[in-house]
Structure formats: structure tokens, C-alpha cells
Image (tube, rainbow, N blue to C red):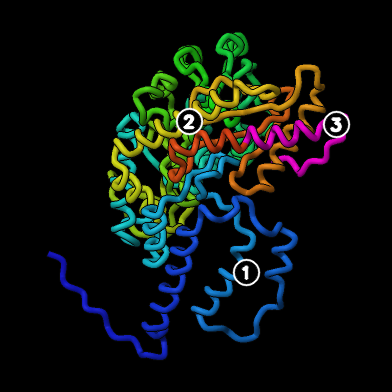
Amino acid sequence: MRKSLSPSPLPATTWVEATDQVDVLRTAQAHATAYRRGLREKPCAPKRNYREMLGVFSEPLPETGSNGADVVNELVDRGEQGLTQMTHPGFFGWVLGGSSPVGVAADWLAGAWGQNAAFHTSSPTAAAVEEIAAGWLLDVLHLPEEAAVGFVTGATVGNFTALAAARGAVLRRAGWDADGDGLFGAPPITVYVGDDAHTSVFSALGYLGLGRNRVKRVSSDGEGRMMASDLAAQLSGQDGPTIVIAQAGQINTGAFDPFQDILEIAKQHNAWIHVDGAFGLWARAHPDYRPLTNGVERADSWAVDGHKWLQTPFDSGYAIVRDRDSLERAMSIDASYLPTVGEQDRIPSFLVPELSRRARGLPTWAMLKFLGRQGVEELVGRHCAIAGKIAERLRGADGVRVVNDVVLNQVIVSFGRAEDTALQRKALTEAVIARLRDQGSIFVGGARWRDDWVMRISVICDATMPADAGPVADLILNAWAEVSARSAAPADTITAGPPG
């Protein structure tokens, strides 16, 4: 039995009065509740832009402090003017979840408890919650139960962390200890990545010293899927340390690489296979969409976001690595003042590139406990169905082209007549996006896809319901009708807002 610990009283002068603490927290809670309750009535786009918000917040550093509750009130009064309503049911601009209140509440506790989640001894609760949540994640994503899970800020750092493990592992196979001796003089690593991989993959490779530009780019098809035949051709005769990066959920089309074929080819060359699955890996939580990912469980590592389909607040992501030893070699940290650890212990800070960090696992645990397996499945199924219904409505309209094969939650749309040039279609599409943002009911984004500028519709907020699909499609079609009616002049002269 542990001996009961009784805290020694601190002198009153060293502690903020308890009533002041409560006032601050209650003030924040009241503002947060009011914000969420009034969300549907707010326009999706911010009222003020970045330059305007700099003016709102600009002032000299105060010489003296202020009352805590007053500071919170002032932050809300000023800050809400520049908020994009990303938790709004009509927000489709980027692939961002809705920060469910349950996850937000758990995140508040993480901040209020003030835990450094680095070690078991620094926070037994944070370490235990992470370990349980890690097992639940592997379960709901149908990934190997022996894999290690690092709780990181998002898929960008998830890719970085997993690829750091990959870098060390493939070089050890070649007799080089990169984690100890660095990359100077190391055998070169060849990295293969699909032409339509997400930009965060290239950033991670740059951070790791593997280079954004040194990668071997593998051809992709019209939906952005890596072509296994080109990978096989490029790997033919390849010798030395090799990493292949595949993708679950192309950021524009939602498409999935052919994992079965990629895995077979890559394994023949002893390559490490990493999967960037920021949002698409959640397809594994639904039996109807899991076949899109067949074979992905045979990879060596994966990156996935919690602040997408799991609806945790920012920042929440996971680096998942089959071989725990490879991850710990890349990430572990040691100093005489740090706690001693047991050989079999799961040490949170040995799985991520951070020592001091918040108890990031709490919102993940809370959301998985809140939703359960069936709740996660329902979210994925609901959003994919909504995306399909929106696309179906848009396909029948004159001058509207759904560009992608809608296999998940992503819809990309181009506007214009058959005889319009790419430049004219771009202007028309930008004008529709700008019109929708001006109206404020929904928020959509824009992106370049192949030779077109397209509207992106990403359905992934927990507040978006099946009944929203029809009105969303109507808003888009009405905006197109207005833009089309104004386009009697040459379309490339239409004035549009900046692309999303």
C-alpha cells in the first residue's frame, strides 16, 4: 500500500486565491459554451482578416498585470472577430474535424491539471491513459496490436516521427547507426513517394535530412493513386536502404494507393513501407470502407490524425510503428535527472520528439470512450454518405463537373462550360468559392488539381448531419447560377476573391 501523502500548506502569499482561479475558469467556460451554442447562426468565414486582427491586438507590453477574468473577457472580445468557424456544420474548407465538446473538455482538464506527460513518474495518469488509448486506437484501426503509438501534434509530425524510425532501421540493416553517428558518411537512402503525396510528407523528409527533392517520384493515376507498375519498374535493380511512402486518402480526391500491390513489390526489395493516412486510415473503422485499405496493415509504420475523424481538438495525431525498438531508438532521450525506467515500460517521451509536453492522450481516450467502436463507424459512414449525396446533386447541373470518383468524404468540383479554357474555369470556380464565403452559410476551399482549379468539399465535422447534404448542394448550385449569370463578359475577366 502506498503511504497517504498529505500536502503541506503553502504560505498564502505564494498562491493565487482559489476564488480568483475559479472565476477565470468559469469565465472561459461561459464564453466557450456561448460560442458553441451560437455557432449555426455565425458566418463560417472570419469577420476580420489577419492584417485587421493585428490591428485589433496591437499594443505595447503592459507594465503591470491585469485581473485574470478580465484578460479572458478581453481575449474573447477581440479574438472572436478573427475566428474561422471550423466547428460549424457547414465548414468544408479543409479536412478538419469538429473538436467535439467531449474532447475539448478532456483537453481543458489536460491544461488545468498541468501534467508533463513525459514519464510514468511525472504523471502516472497521463502515461496510463496514453497506453490504454494507444491499444484502443490499434483496435479501431485494425492495425497490429504489437505496434507502438506515439502521441504527436498531427500527421506532419507523425510522418516525421515514423520516418525517423524508418531512417534508423534501414540504415542499421546496412550496418550504419544513424541515430548515434548521424548521416555524414552513411549509405544513401532511396525514398519512393507517389506524385500526389501530401506536402507534409516532403516536409518530414526535409526535416530528417533525406531531402524534399531527392525523392524518387512514382507516377500516379487520374485519382492520385500511386501506380504500382511504375514503382516496380523504378525499384528494379534498386540496392541499398529503401523507404516507400504510400497514401491512404489523397487530400483532394480521397483516393487510396493499391496497398496490396505496393506491399508485395516493396517487400521484395526489403524496403520499409510507411503510410501517410492522416484522414484516410480512419476508413478502416467502417466495414464498408475498410476494403479501400486492404493490405495496409502489413506496412511498417503509419501516421494518422485524431483532430480529423476522431474529432479531438487540435493538436492531436499519432505516429504508429510496428517495431517499437526502431521508434524508441530514434526518439529516446536520456539525462541523469530523468526517472529510471523498466525494460518493458512504455515511456511516452521515448515515442515522440518531445520531452516536455501536455497530456495529449486525454482527449483521445475521452473521444474513444465517448464514441466507442460503433460511434467512430457511424461518423465515417455518415460523412462519406453526405459527400456522396452532395456529389450526386451537383453532377446533374449544367456547367458543374464533379472531378473525382467520390470514394470517401472528399468532393472536388470545377465550374464552367465545355468550351471554356482552363483559365476561364479557374476564374469561374474562384468566383463560386468567393460567393459562398461572402454568403457565410458554408465554407469551402480551393486547390489546383491537374489542369483545373477546383472547389474542395471536405465532409468531416461531427456537427454535419445527413439533412445538411441537400441544402449544401443547393447553396453551391445557387452560387454557381449567380456567377454564371454574371459571366456574359469573358469569364477570365470575372473578379473573384483569393483562392481557398
Q: Which mark is residue 492?
A: 3
Mark nearer the viewer, 3 or 2: 3
Q: Is residue 497 magenta?
A: yes
Residue under the image location 49 percent in, 51 percent down: 314
Residues at marks 1 and 2, CA–CA distance in whole angstroms: 36 Å
Write down the residue under mark 2.
280
Quarter holding residue 237? top right
Compared with 451, 4 (above or below) is: below
Q: Amino acid at mark 1?
A: Arg
Whether residue 153 can be seen here: yes
Write down the residue under mark 1.
78
Whether residue 170 can be seen here: no
Left or right: residue 42 versus residue 217 is left
Image quarter hosting the C terminus: top right
Total marks drawn? Answer: 3
Q: Looking at the picture, tell me which residue is in the foreground, 215 or 200.
A: 200
Does the residue at mark 3 contact the one at mark 2 (Cβ under 8 Å)?
no
Residue under the image location 33 percent in, 34 percent down: 140
Q: Looking at the picture, tell me which residue is in the foreground, 13 or 168.
A: 13
